[in-house]
Image: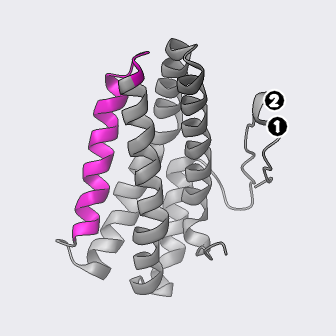
């Protein structure tokens, strides 16, 4: 059964969906043992275009609210920032090496699962409803996603058999 996501977190969850699609593409290239340089290039571009603003939204908007709600020293908050820094380092050094591509894909997937299953659950359980509208507005501003403007998922034809939804 899918988790119910607070509306203030939906733009971040949409980004997670897109990031898992990137993980899927990396793993397809790794299984095929082909086009690894192209996968690395596409992943670096995805990182710069999508994950940099995503991390910024989480760190500038979500993190301060979570520090207030959970306490500044909560271990989940340190994990959030540590994962972001590690993903930045991995993306900077990413090339067609199977080891580097695999390490990036594995950490990105684990990080997304951590946020969706643990961090966002803590947010929904501890952040007051009154603070959530400001969180959503801040996240949408940084991601350049105004309220009411759906975000479409760009799905390449080679993964068309998977089911995607319009957002």
Q: Element at badge 1?
A: loop
Q: Relative to 42, is 58 on the left or the right?
A: left
What secondary structure predominates along the stretch shown in magenta? helix
The percent position of residue 53, horizontal first and vertical second, equals: 46, 43
Residue 125 lies in the magenta-colored region: no
Work out which quarter of the rendered image holds the C terminus and state it: bottom right
Quadrant in which residue 150 is drawn: bottom right
Circle 1 packing at 10 Å, graded few (<14), some (14-19), many (20+), is few
Which residue carries the number 1 mark? Answer: 160
Residue 52 shows up from this direction:
no
> Looking at the image, which residue is at 49% across and 65% down?
116
Find the distance from the CA under tag 1 to the CA under tag 2: 5 Å
Q: Is residue 79 visible?
A: yes
Q: Residue at x 80, y 53 (%)?
A: 166
Q: Which residues are magenta?
A: 75-98
Depth check: give the residue in front, 79 or 27.
27
The residue positioned 38% from the left and 44% from the top of the image is 107
Q: Which numbered marker is on residue 157?
A: 2
Is residue 155 shown above or below 34? below
Q: Nearer the viewer, residue 125 or 40?
A: 40
């Amino acid at each position: 059964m899918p988790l119910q996501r607070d509306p203030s977190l939906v733009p971040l969850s949409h980004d997670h969906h897109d990031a898992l699609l990137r993980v899927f593409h990396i793993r397809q290239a790794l299984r095929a043992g082909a086009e690894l340089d192209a996968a690395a290039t596409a992943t670096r571009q995805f990182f710069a275009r999508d994950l940099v603003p995503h991390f910024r939204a989480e760190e500038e908007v979500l993190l301060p609210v979570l520090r207030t709600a959970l306490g500044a020293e909560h271990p989940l908050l340190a994990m959030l920032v540590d994962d972001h820094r590690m993903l930045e380092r991995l993306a900077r050094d990413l090339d067609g090496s199977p080891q580097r591509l695999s390490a990036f894909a594995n950490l990105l997937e684990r990080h997304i699962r951590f946020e969706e299953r643990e961090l966002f659950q803590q947010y929904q359980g501890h952040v007051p409803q009154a603070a959530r509208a400001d969180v959503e507005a801040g996240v949408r501003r940084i991601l350049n996603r105004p309220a009411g403007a759906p975000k479409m998922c760009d799905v390449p034809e080679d993964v068309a058999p998977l089911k995607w939804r319009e957002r």
